[in-house]
Image (tube, rainbow, N blue to C red):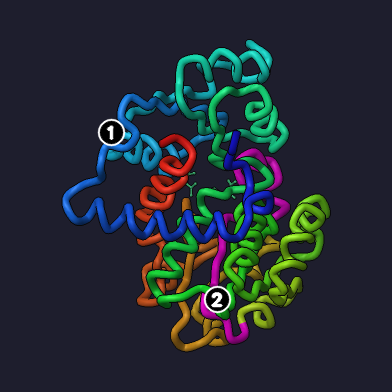
Amino acid sequence: MKHFLELASWSSAEIHHLLKLAVHLKFEWQSGGNRPVLQRKILGMIFQKPSLRTRVSFEVAMKHLGGDAIMLGPQEIGLGQRESIADVARVLSSYVQGIMARVFDQAHVEELAQYSRVPVINGLSDAFHPCQAMADMLTIYENFGRLEGLKLAYVGDGNNVAASLLEAAAHFGMAFAIATPEGYELPEATRQHTAGLIQRSGIPVMMTTHPQQAVEQAHVIYTDTWVSMGQEKEAADRRPLFQPYQVNAALLRHARADHVVMHCLPAHRGEEITDDVADGRHSVIFQQAENRLHAQKAILVHLLA
Ligand code: CP
Ligand code: NVA
């Protein structure tokens, strides 16, 4: 059975198919509504962390496609605490036709998948955020009419969002540059996980500590929070180190004139991104947020229909 836990284990052909399907489902929705291809299908949504976009867009996607979703918050099922992850997977997958889970440890979403009888989708872990990356590719595609040959520059923390963007960039033939403070690079495990995919794709990858170098000639400048969910205790230590990595007007002068600025949200305005940039004419952050809905419909239809 197919699960959607990260992007490197999917073929580029499949990922390209998902993007095409997302374009189609967005058009279908805007032309009067989606066909109810997920009728009588229920998605169980496990959340061990807070969410606005992921929680709402998955539930709305299921409803638009004729199905429904059930929200299971952190206080409800006690994943791995009240009950083992394996038992949660066995029981939940006997009721629902798909599971979406937002967890801390990537191993936990993998364990859910191992014991589930239905497809499992990673709605963000500490390691990856593949649904976000699919929505981001859709957004970039809409803005440039292509993906191959573009350059994406990520500035900030080498986190889950950055890792999935690197994988997506490789699938679509986009050059990838990442600028992080020393000690906050993409983790070694992520680099190993993505090494094969990057080699096959042949994309140029730059890892640097210099934001200006990363954004040079970039079509897309992307940032995310300096303090991810679960890292709250590190906030005071991180902020001063990340200050030179703020995406602001001065940094963007090094990008291409036709660049777009992206952020997965929630944004910490005045920290990783300034207000004038987030609300400026190059920003596509709310198009990105909307596209979570359309990109996830494609993932749901592909896995559950
Ligand atoms: N971008 C994103 O995943 O947002 P939420 O945390 O609100 O779901
Ligand atoms: N890197 C952030 C993304 C939030 C959508 C986090 O994990 O908190």
Q: Looking at the figure, which quarter contains the C terminus?
A: top left
Is 279 inside the magenta-drawn segment?
no
- For the magenta stretch, what is the residue range? 216-238
Q: Is residue 226 visible?
A: no
Say which amino acid is labelled 2: Glu
Residue drawn at x 42%, y 48% is 298
Q: Position of residue 159 (x, y in %)?
A: 67, 53
Q: Quadrant of the N terminus?
A: top right
* Quadrant hosting residue 82: top right
Mark 1 highlights which residue? 66
- Residue pointed to by mark 2: 148
Q: CA distance from mark 2 to mark 1?
A: 34 Å
User: Residue 21 location, x and y as percent?
Assistant: 40, 55
Q: Residues within 10 Å of mark 2 (few under 14, many from 20)?
A: some
Residue 240: x percent and y percent?
69, 61
Relative height, residue 26 to residue 126 (above, below): below
